[in-house]
Image (cartoon, coloured by chain):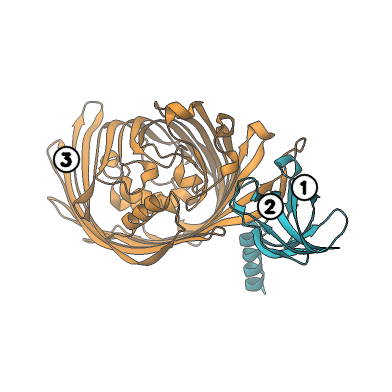
Amino acid sequence: MRKVLCILLSAMLLSSCVKQVETDVFCSLSLTAVMPDGTDIMQMTVDNSLPGNFLRNVNTMQKYDFPVFVNNHGGPLRVRKGVYTIAFDGVARIVGESGLVEKKVRFVAYNSPDKAVMLLEDSADVRLELIVLE
Amino acid sequence: MKGFRHILAIVFMLNGLAASAQHWLPFNTLVHDAEDQVSPTAFLSRFATSWNDASVGVDLRREDSAFLPQEGNGKLEGFFNYGTYVRFGNGSAARGGARYSRGVKRDVIWNSTSDFSILYPYVMADSLECDLQSEQYSFNGYYATHAGKFVLGGGAQYRALHEYRDFDPRPRNITSDLKVSASAGYPVKSYLLDLSASFRKYYQNQALTFYNKKGANTNEFQFLGLGAHYPRFEGSENFYRTYYKGFGWSAALSMRPADRADGWSSALSLASLSLKRRLPILNNAVLCELNTLNAGIFTSLRNTKGRVRHNTLLKAGYEHRQGIEPLLDSKSGSDFGSLLDVEMYTADILSGSIESVIEFPREKGTLALNPSASAYSFSSGYVYPERKMDFAYAEAGAGTSYRSSIGKLAYYIGAEALYKVNLGGSLDIPSDFTQELIAAHYGRIHAAFTDNCLSAGLNARIKYGICYLSMSYRRLFFGSGNGTDCLCSALGLEF
């Protein structure tokens, strides 16, 4: 009994020396794009080569590519948990009265560290409310 | 056992033989050093009389290619060392010491922080290969006494380190490291069972006294682990004023012969140090946290009687390093608190060694043999972007020495040779600006080498005590023409 107690105490002591913290560093990120009038987006693309289009971790400055959005949804993306800035100009294809229409759209709601979005859970769904440029 | 300090010790060959030519014979220090690390009362009945020892010396290291670039490829250091042991009439004893050293580390690269062996991987770094000026003061004092059947004791040690660079960017680091210890021992048969504990406080203030990006032509990086760095807090002088602050503790259970030199001596020890690196300009935001856990065990057997004396030490150690990186908020008006603490860096270090000193005392002098063997394993990883580095090695060798006296003069000469062999490992680092450096560094750690040492000392009895001069020269051969030279000499007076 004494031996068991000693082993348990030792194990407790050892485990208390190492701080128990989050070990899963990734977040499964899904993006949902929404037009101002609620129109469904068949497909939306973002030119990832443009510096003004970014999905960026504020702490590490790591930039991720935007996926192609289909039926309003993009992703999921495997990103590191953290604080993110998001901004882009894209081209959305929607079904209008005269058929398939392309519209230039913009998202700027999280475009600076001061407005950044936190992705701290194992999964997150971020809603992107678009502005129509033309 | 002490992590990278084990590797550092190989390269630096700290003052070992040269500064300890007199009463600190390798036969004794082999176990005394191990005992002193776990108990502040171990020295109580070690010497029959009081003594003082003052010495000055120089420590020189020169490497063709740096083994650890973060500690430079050379060192030139002068030092003054004082030690004392005082026996009181009531069976109590005290010991103390002071040391001052001043020198320069040559061509330090990828490290602008002091105490790299304690703080890695969380250091500030740049790509300049410059000299780092270094100045260190250290003091220690311990007292031990008998209280009935108990042996009680305690003391403290303090170290202050000042390191700076005279070239832009100019880091200036001021470190203080305090450790307070106490222990209680109780006799069990012919042995003393000792329980000791200590508390440690560590602080390092780090600043750039001058930084101009254009003039310096470089950037400072906040390193995270295996080449990863923290871009958010780079590029501005304000972000380079940080400090490390933390606390540690240790506990040890040891057993050693009571009031005699011969017999078994063993100990089990556990130590922890937890440090946080903070950024004053952002409300003392925590940039990273490093938790280090050490567990060690040793056992030794000493026999000082007969025509063959021996002293053998077997020890093993484990160290776990855990690096935690908080995710900091970015909103204006926030207190820059942590949104989430994430474990990003881990390192596990295993080590084991066996060493023996065998002496053959004869009328004309004493011949000693010193065989040793050790193994070391280091395994580290960074979670994202994923990086890994593992290596392991073993080394074995033997030394021999002879000491004798002629009239009032005494002398010793010694030679030692060790061979280190690589036991495997792997390096998995994504391609970026540090790849070349880390790959080269890894190749160096991984390389086999031979380690050869020559040492000599001369003692003369004079009116005031014993005057001594000691020197040791060490040469490590890495192959491909690469090598490391270490020279240490000391002139001292024991009285």
Tell me the residue that label 2 is attached to.
A82
> What number is the disc on residue A67?
none
Colour applied to chain A: cyan
Colour applied to chain B: orange
Residue at the image point whose x is 35% and y is 49% from the top: B9
| Mark 2 to mark 3 CA distance (whole Å) | 68 Å
Tell me the chain of label 2: A
Residue B287, quarter of picture: top right
| Mark 3 to mark 1 CA distance (whole Å) | 94 Å
Q: Are marks 2 and 3 in contact (CB under 8 Å)?
A: no
Left or right of residue A112, residue B171 in this image = left
Tell me the residue that label 3 is attached to.
B410
SS state under label 1: loop
Tell me the residue that label 1 is attached to.
A133
| Mark 2 to mark 1 CA distance (whole Å) | 30 Å
How packed mark 1 is, by other alpha carbons closer than 10 Å (few <14, some 14-19, many 20 or more), is few
Amino acid type of the residue tagged 2 in the rendering: Gly
Q: Answer above or below: position of B474 versus B216.
A: below
Residue at the image point whose x is 32% and y is 45% from the top: B12
Could you say which is closer to the camera, residue B229 or residue B370?
B229
Eye-nearest disc, 2 or 1: 1
Amino acid type of the residue tagged 1 in the rendering: Leu
- Residue A24 shows in the view: no
Tell me the chain of label 3: B
Could you say which is closer to the camera, residue B259 or residue B222?
B222
Q: Answer above or below: position of B212 versus B441.
A: above
